[in-house]
Image (cartoon, rainbow, N blue to C red):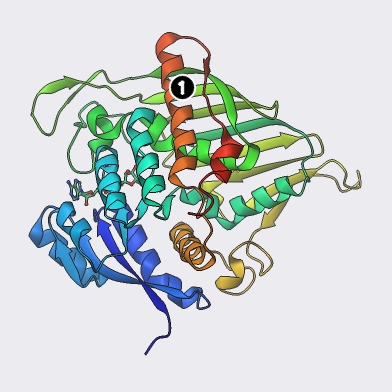
Amino acid sequence: MSAKKTLRIGLIGYGFMGRTHSNAYKRVGDFFPELKYRPVLKAVCARNQERVQAFAEQWGYESVETDWRALIAREDIDAIDICTPNNMHAEIAIAAAAAGKMVLCEKPLARTVAEAQPMVDAVEKAGVRNTVWYNYRRIPAVTLAKKLIDAGKLGKIFHYRANFLQDWTISPELPQGGEGLWRLDNDAAGSGVTGDLLAHCIDTAMWLNGGIKDVSAVTETFVKERLHSGTGELTKVGIDDACIFHCHFENGSLGVFESTRYARGHKALNTFEINGEHASIRWDLHDLNRLEYFDHRDDPMIRGWRTIHVTDGDHPYMDKWWVPGLSIGYEHTFVHQVADFLKSIEEQTICSPTFREAQETQKVCEAVLESAATRSWKDTGVNWDASRLINAEH
Ligand SMILES: NC(=O)c1ccc[n+]([C@@H]2O[C@H](COP(=O)([O-])OP(=O)(O)OC[C@H]3O[C@@H](n4cnc5c(N)ncnc54)[C@H](O)[C@@H]3O)[C@@H](O)[C@H]2O)c1
């Protein structure tokens, strides 16, 4: 008999994220054996009985539900994991918190700040543990960037630059709405690249470089009308296909962010570069195990960009995997987030980012969209440090 305590998971949605999370729950115990909690794949929920049953059999879930309310009502579930399109996050999270369940929610927290606020209130009022899957923070090279910045290696920071570029929506023949294409439907997604891709960049940026104070943005919708999969009608496209914004951080540095789904040749070019008084760092998702570092204080004869292969046992999370020099990948970020979540239960601390922290990212996204719509600078209203302190018991 295992001496471990169990965390009984109820997963909602078995698409892309349903798979990454299921994989993480299954692998975490093997690679983080010291954890006192062990996830149990208790139930998975989606609307189609046949398909959800097939998913449950493939991934090893004990049972299925076709109504998420029935899943939340079950007494044998401790944590609800929300892997549905963005328009479903709020209703499910609020109901789950009211039922006393822990809530793990996919990003973005919701479609708007107004929709997200009752979610924050619900988890805090119920006192249930909560986290949002901004998983890029848990790529070891990105976590290392955070350590270098916090250790003061870069000195005063002047510039933060981030991109998230894709090319999969260029064809005007692509419909909006429905399975796989809900991201193009503003009702389901809430926005285009801003909430889908830039939200990741913004979360990482504020985690590394502090709060974003104000923004000035431009957005574009290149394809104005698309067939809607639900109605079959040619319908106005409401999402932003591309977004560029610049901003001031609270620490006085300047930020530049760009995201599009129209950059032919780029599938998921997610990058950042940070320039400080002493040193600079840069990172690229396509080469995720490497962090590039330039330090002006080096001996001038050998000064230059160095590439740190973030695979040594001393590097964040890497002592859990193979031997030094061997790479890990995208799926490991989700294993790390589950490990950190389980540890947070054990240690009675937060698993960052909480709903409250993710709401700060939501505020930036909303200010970006408002700025673009009004062609003016917008204050974000972000209070980053406070968001990380409040609710520390969860
Ligand atoms: N953290 C990340 O890097 C990352 C990456 C991709 C997506 N996401 C986020 O994850 C969420 C899901 O995205 P995805 O790519 O997995 O989408 P997807 O389209 O692959 O899967 C969505 C799932 O939700 C299910 N679903 C929809 N309505 C439902 C309902 N009423 N009841 C039960 N199930 C329902 C669908 O059947 C499907 O299984 C989104 O919020 C998205 O923004 C995050």
Q: Quadrant of residue 243?
A: top left
Could you tell me which residue is drawn at 22 percent across and 66 percent down? Answer: 75
Q: In this image, 11 relative to 300: left or right?
A: left
Is 263 or 247 nearer to us in this picture?
247
User: Given the image, on which type of amino acid does mark 1 rest?
Assistant: Ala
Say if 369 sits above or below 142 in the image: above
Could you tell me which residue is drawn at 29 percent across and 39 percent down? Answer: 86
Residue at the front extreme?
A: 125
> Is residue 108 at least partly visible in the picture?
no
> Is residue 356 at least partly visible in the picture?
yes
Is 96 or 54 nearer to us in this picture?
96
Could you tell me which residue is drawn at 51 percent across and 51 percent down? Answer: 352
Q: Quadrant of residue 178?
A: top left
Q: In this image, 125 relative to 380: left or right?
A: left
Quadrant where the N terminus lies? bottom left
Residue at the bottom extreme?
A: 1
Residue that badge 1 annotates: 367
Say if 309 sits above or below 219 in the image: below
Give the percent coordinates (x, y) of residue 99: 26, 54
